[in-house]
Amino acid sequence: MPDYSTVEATTYDLIVIGGGINGVAVARDAALRGLKTILIEKSDFGAGTTSWSSRLVHGGLRYLEYFEFNLVRESLREREILLRAAPHLVKPIQMTIPIYAQGSRSYWEIQAGMVLYDLLSYDKSLPNHRMLGEKKMRQLFRDVEPEGCRGAAQYYDAQVEYAERLCLEIVLSAQDAGATMLSYVTVTQLQRSGNRIASLVCRDSDTGAAFTVRGHDQTVVINTSGPWVDSVCRSGIQGNAPAPVGKTRKIGGTRGSHIIVEKFPGAPDEALYVEALTDGRPFFILPWLGMCLIGTTDIRFDGDLDKVHANNDEIDYLLNETNRVIPTAQLTRDLVRFTYAGIRPLPYSEGKKTSSITRSHVLYDHTPEAVENMVSLIGGKLTTHRQVGEEMVDAALKKQRKQRQPHSHSATRQAPLPGAMAMHGARDMITTANRDVVAHLLSVYGARTPEVLALVEEFPELAEPIVAGQPEIKAQIVYSIRAELARTYVDICRRRTAVAMRGNYGFDALPVVAEVLKRYCGWSGEQCDRNLLDYYTFMRDNCIPEYQLDQYQPPVMTAVV
């Protein structure tokens, strides 16, 4: 548990609200520049939109048709930076776009887009695009619907299978640079002094302990709470200004839903980027951890941001559209292993078509709303998080009139994330565990793999799988608690590992998780029981489809009365 007395005794240069990938990128950039930084996240790091994404680091090919060339160029540049900064997590993936006569774009229009995409990524390390004729397309993709297919375009982007872990590595890097990173802490009140946010009243979600985060006369508050930006702006304010921060709505979120299915007949080894027949919306069929990740939808959302579900219609839409493109798939609801949905924190736009709303991020300065030291992020993508961090800290330094100080330039363009650093003896330890286990750990932890293997050296039984037939091992449970700021079953099974997403929503893993936490991390039976109930509630509210809810009943408590 953090020492909140130390927090209260410190004054901070930068206070960040929201620990998704954009918020943690701001904290990392600021800490690397020498600013006294604190980040406050009401749940786990990356628990919101970051963990519900399509898990792609991409240039945004479809943004070209809306003439957002600057966004595409920025995204492609950031993709290249991430391929270098986190090569164990961010990896190239080939995309194929089947081109149909009945599609909204012709073969030549798509080819022109491909040429422009290559031009905008002139400094890339990935290959240029290639066009496939009708005959070649049928040779390479025998299971893709041939009727009306005129060929295909192929190009490269990047995939981050463990998007939550990319966020976590940024958290660890920020901590190493001196930032204070608080999870499971809610901001309950923004306190003003004149036209400035002077302090924040916060509450620990577990203990209920209240404490105050204080700034000085140059402190800047950064609101990177994603879909919750407006909620943060409405937080209670004391002092001489009873109104909330601004009165206009900033966020007009849209829901994007995904399904994970078993590998099906005709499933491509590389990604397909296809156009839905129903509404013309592009969606992805992606290889993901031996399964297929399919998504996404784009539906306006005004509901409870903490309970976001892929509904039955969306699931059927993704299944049916996939079956149309790959007739051999014959996907049904029974083959769905996991579903999830997240809210894109897009700019509020009344009546505008969701797909046409800009994906460019906006740094909203609240000075016109009589709060001169607060900036909110509207929008933001997984791919461009580092750029957002740099821009936000530049804006904060400008407000602090510190832009000419020695640490005024961002170091994040060159600085690798922890897992990308030198392996420090990993080769010596690889022989102590099963080769497949080590390969899995390297794909998750990169250069930090020896730290996980050290637990196996000390306790050989921790090399056993959490769930039979899955690659995750017990040592990962212990490591997530000791070294990765995990505090709950959901943190461990959904965001530190992929156990929850591989099958049965992770329920098969929970007895082993409880056993390991009791034996190696000192958890009590009561603590485990409470986490079991919270885990069920989370899965019910966010992941288990409506049509499956009857199959999952609340757990029976043993230690909690």
Image: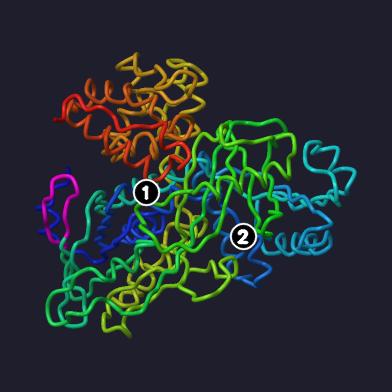
Q: Quickly name the residue at label 2.
A: 60
At a point 53% along the width and 44% down the height, the residue shown is 160
Query: Which dot, 1 or 2, sits closer to the camera?
Result: 1
Residue 446 appears in the picture as rendered: no
Q: Earlier in the sequence, mark 1 or mark 2?
A: 1
How dense is the environment of label 2, judged by Cα within 10 Å: few (below 14), some, or many (20 and up)? Answer: many
Residue 527 to residue 416: above or below = above
At a point 39% along the width and 22% down the height, the residue shown is 466
**Most foreground residue, 263 or 351:** 351
At a point 41% along the width and 42% down the height, the residue shown is 418
| Three-letter code, disc 2 | Gly
| Magenta region, residue range | 202-213
Within the image, what quadrant is residue 112 found in? bottom right
Residue 310 to residue 365: above or below = above
Q: Secondary structure at mark 1?
A: loop
Q: Secondary structure at mark 2?
A: loop
**Placement of the N terminus among the 4 image quadrants:** top left
Horizontal and vertical percent for residue 104? Answer: 76, 63
Can residue 203 be found in the magenta stretch?
Answer: yes
Measured Cα–Cα span from mark 1 to mark 2: 23 Å
**Placement of the C terminus among the 4 image quadrants:** top left
Horizontal and vertical percent for residue 144? Answer: 77, 41
Within the image, what quadrant is residue 303 found in? bottom left
**Most foreground residue, 467 or 192:** 467
**Most foreground residue, 472 or 419:** 472
Q: Quickly name the residue at label 1.
A: 47
Residue 9 appears in the picture as rendered: yes
Horizontal and vertical percent for residue 509? Answer: 37, 25
At a point 67% along the width and 47% down the height, the residue shown is 321
